Amino acid sequence: VFYHPGYRVSPLVFCGCLGILPRGSHPTAPQPGDLIVVIGGRTGRDGLGGATFSSAGLDPEASTVARSAVQIGRPILEKQLLEVILQAREERLYHAITDCGAGGLSSAVGEMARRLGACVHLDRVPLKDHSLRPYEIWLSESQERMVLAVPPENWPRFREICALHGVEAAAIGNFEASGQLRLFYQGHPVGTLDVAFLHEGRPQRILEARWRPPAPSAQRSRAFSSSVDLSRILLTLLAHPNIRSREDILRRYDHEVQGATAIKPLVGIANHGPSDAVVLVPPEFLPREGPIPGIAMAVGLAPQYGERDPYQMAWAAIDEAFRNLVTVGADPDSVALLDNFCWGDPGDPEQLGALVRCAQGCLDAARAYQAPFISGKDSLHNVYEDAEGRAHAIPGTLLITAVARVPDLDRAVTTDLKRAGDMLYLVGDTRPELGNSHYALIGADMPPEADRLPQPVPQALDRMRALHRAIAAGLVQACHDLSEGGLGVALAEMSLAGRLGARIDLRQVPGFESLGTDEEVLFSESLSRFLVEVRPEDAAAFETCLAGCPVARIGEVSADGLLRVIGRDGSERLCLPVEALEQAWRGELAPAISRVPAPTPHAPPTIGILRSRPRVLILQAPGTNRDREAALACQLAGGEPEIVPLARLLRGERSLLDYAMLVLPGGFSYGDDLGAGTMWALDLRLRLGEAMERFIASGRPVLGICNGFQALVKAGLLPGPEFLEPDGSRTVTLALNASGHFECRWVWLRPNPRSPCLFTEGIEELLYCPVAHGEGRFMARSEAILDRLEAQGLIALTYVDPCGQPAGYPFNPNGSQRGIAGICNPAGNVLGLMPHPEDHIFPWQHPRWCRGESGGIALILFQNALRRC
């Protein structure tokens, strides 16, 4: 998140997606005779001209003009599309695939037909607005549509898969070796274009690009006294919008879905410190034995430098992305890059000149770091008019996204300090580079010679390789890159994340002799620098790994909870308690979680060996997104899971009673359009009612997680029919979170030893799982209902603090009455809970496993259930 006045009218939002596919499973060559198949959403007037609008300037009338250019998203249909494509890919049913993006069918079909030709019948395209004219059908950018080249012999099977997942499919033409793109509407030709001309015939535009360095700015006025209060500067920087905690934003997004997040966006002793990157371990990566590999993802963004030199901005963004990856244990020789350019009008020679200079920076940095750009995106013409008609361009912005391989997850590290007595090393040169830094942005004074942008470091890649070798050898306990706010902010963030103090001596910083002031040493934003925590016994080996690099021991971790900085003259220039750092950085969030002892571990109950692998039905409704994690948990627990789309049960292709256990996983069934789990509940009650009743009455386990819990409650299956009113109305529900927004955080759960619940039987230790929901607040119609649930032991799981005691927010993340996290039916074979036990089935899913913490693994819930099958 980066704030700048230039984004007020035209804010930028970047969204990325990382996918993993089997090698050789992505065909890209349509064949003559292949059907042109459109699947997904119907084509409408929404999104018509969207690409053109996105590249046009904004004026006061834009909101009225652009209504039809804005696409209407349907994420649930997107998930159904995903299921279709995955199954069709596994069965190799198509020769090529692409999405309908800018230009709609015109670009999708036109690109696929590049080396062939195509015949398209526009009247066969499924429409949601039948008043569309042929050219509008051809150009509409309605979302959730894919185009595939399907051999005719595969069309029946492909259509069957689409029907299974409730996805509409239509064959609108075929690819042909004609070299022509031919369009028809109701049998009449409406367009013919030579594909060679379409792709090669347009003359190259020649635009003028001009870049001139801006004139040097006048010396900034002093914002602080001549004595320069470093404590005040540091606290001001920590509270800066570009540096402060993003927790209030991050908690509103599900960063646990798919159960693959090993290093999370928030780390540290209380799960609220900053992380330089995330590390993912998709199930496909899990080896049978040996090291567990992962994928690290990070970004780099430095638009403040672009105001003075877009070339330096590009280099700084790539360097930051690399640093962030290396700090978590990624191999710098495996990095791949993506660029996102957002710029003003390229018809303006000054704007285009700045863009060209930025692109040159990307090229030079990518060559220096030996990293390829594998993808990218641009959005130009980001210009808006004010009320007086004056045109303004956004700040030229480059976002770099980087991915890299983590060879061994056990060697991954986080930013939080781990242990008092450990040594702190600074890797990299610190130079007088405070130009357009965050130190400058807060109005602090600086010497004229320090008013320079961070310069490229030619030896950066070699230094990162050396640091990676040290991390891979297990010599590093914590690592943080130096970016916004320099050494001072990096040290403060590591301290507050680990709730440990630190003492550093600026006289030990490599290159400090060339720096004229303590402020330069502490707040310079020079590139390619890292702050590293090393155990004393590993110091010699660490220094050997970094031989030839600028590296020095500058301090140590302390247990006194104070951050101390010794200045160049030997005096103590800064002394702040960690609580003050946290208060500045977290603002209103601090101190949300006080220091609490870790829960006392108990020996897990003995689980008997299963004589067979019971069949488990993972019921997949439209919009379910945690079915694969649930299946993996059941498999690890000894079951034989099968993910079954709801349509297969309803059509009689599968019978519920053929399975020993039923799991209703989390997600957003039917988009939760009528309330969370409401439509899924109707399916359970009205379309599967008899089968569900027989299944439950037989004593077979039923587990509803998050959205599945909501569906069981709203279907009246939990806590059970005996809790329904005479008119059939429910006495309990799951309402909007008390916070009023989505919550994603880890919570402690205490099993009720008096509960008849077979899932929690014999569990003495607390369970630890993430929640990720917006409607999870358990509420009863009256206190009498709550008393009755409690008396019968039907409250199977409650939210508690790490000591096992009832507590309020954030330990109770949704404000549930009596801290209720999960309930069961009187027979104990049906359990519903809002937290996600399927997302803590491996030790590395624990948010503090890098700190050596473990316990609370929730796989036992699945093991208990399958033991009863």
Image (spheres, rainbow, N blue to C red):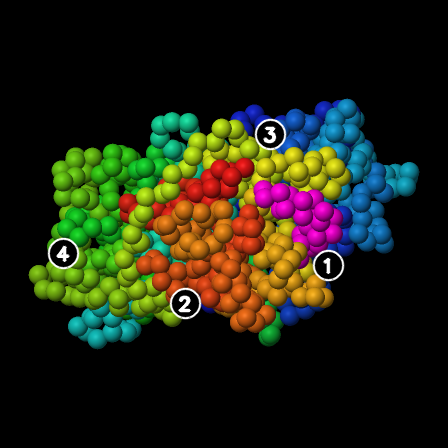
Indicate yes or no whether the magenta region holds residue 591. Answer: no
Left or right of 384? Residue 124 is right
Look at 25% across and 74% down and name the residue there.
224
Find residue 388 and report its image quarter.
Answer: bottom right
The amino acid at mark 1 is: Ser
Look at 63% across and 46% down and name the residue there.
697
Indicate which disc residue 505 carries.
4
x, y percentage for residue 833?
52, 54
The amino acid at mark 2 is: Gly
The amino acid at mark 3 is: His
Task: Name the foreground residue: 607 vs 859.
Answer: 607
Indicate which disc residue 808 carries.
2
Answer with mark 2 or mark 3, whichever residue precedes in sequence: 3
Indicate which disc residue 68 carries.
1
Answer with mark 3 or mark 1, whichever residue precedes in sequence: 3
Give the residues in magenta.
677-700
Indicate yes or no whether the magenta region holds residue 688. Answer: yes
Q: Is mark 1 on a helix, strand or loop?
A: helix
Cα gap from disc 2 to disc 3, whole angstroms: 49 Å
Q: Which of marks 4 and 3 is in front?
A: 3
Cα gap from disc 4 to disc 2, whole angstroms: 42 Å
Q: What element carries label 2?
A: loop
Cα gap from disc 3 to disc 1, whole angstroms: 34 Å
Task: Name the foreground residue: 417 vs 709.
Answer: 709
